[in-house]
Amino acid sequence: MQFLVHSKTIAELEYDSETCVLRVLYKDGRVSSVPDVAPTLVMKIVARVPLEKSPYLMQTAI
């Protein structure tokens, strides 16, 4: 699943439900992958806009 994110630093989140890996694409071109992320956490992250307003979710995801 791919999610476009309207934030200052993150451009896109991509989640692979088979491997439970969350891939974060930053606007500056950096990419970060986080293994073993539960689907419910991904939905919580996507539901919060903008992501920067929630430091806990940002630290958990990245």
Image (cartoon, rainbow, N blue to C red):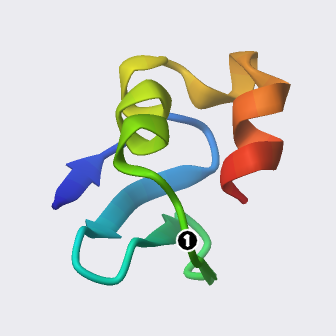
Residue 35 locus on image (x, y percent): 58, 78
Asked whether, in this view, residue 30 is left or right of residue 21, the answer is: right
Give me the residue at 55% from left, 81% from top.
29
Q: Residue at x 24, y 68 (%)?
A: 17
Horizontal relation, residue 39 to residue 55: left or right: left
Q: Looking at the rendering, which quadrant does residue 5 occupy?
A: top left
Amino acid type at circle 1 is Asp
Would residue 4 be visible to someone looking at this image? yes
Q: Which is nearer the eye, 30 or 2?
A: 2
Figure quadrant of the C terminus: bottom right
- Residue 6 in view here: no
Where is residue 53, by image quadrant? top right
Q: Secondary structure at mark 1?
A: loop
Residue 52 versus residue 30 in the image, above or below: above
Judging by the rendered image, the residue that carries numbered circle 1 is 36
Please tell me which residue lies in front, 45 or 11. Answer: 45
Position of residue 61 measured from the top left corner of the image (x, y, whole percent): 66, 52
Dividing the image into 4 quarters, which one contains the N terminus?
bottom left
Up-down relation of residue 49 to residue 22 (above or below): above
Taking the spot 38% from the left edge, 32% from the top edge, the residue there is 46
Residue 52 against residue 25 in the figure, above or below? above
Given the current orientation, which residue lies at the most extreme left position?
Answer: 1
Q: Position of residue 3 (x, y in %)?
A: 24, 49
Residue 59 pos. (x, y %): 82, 45
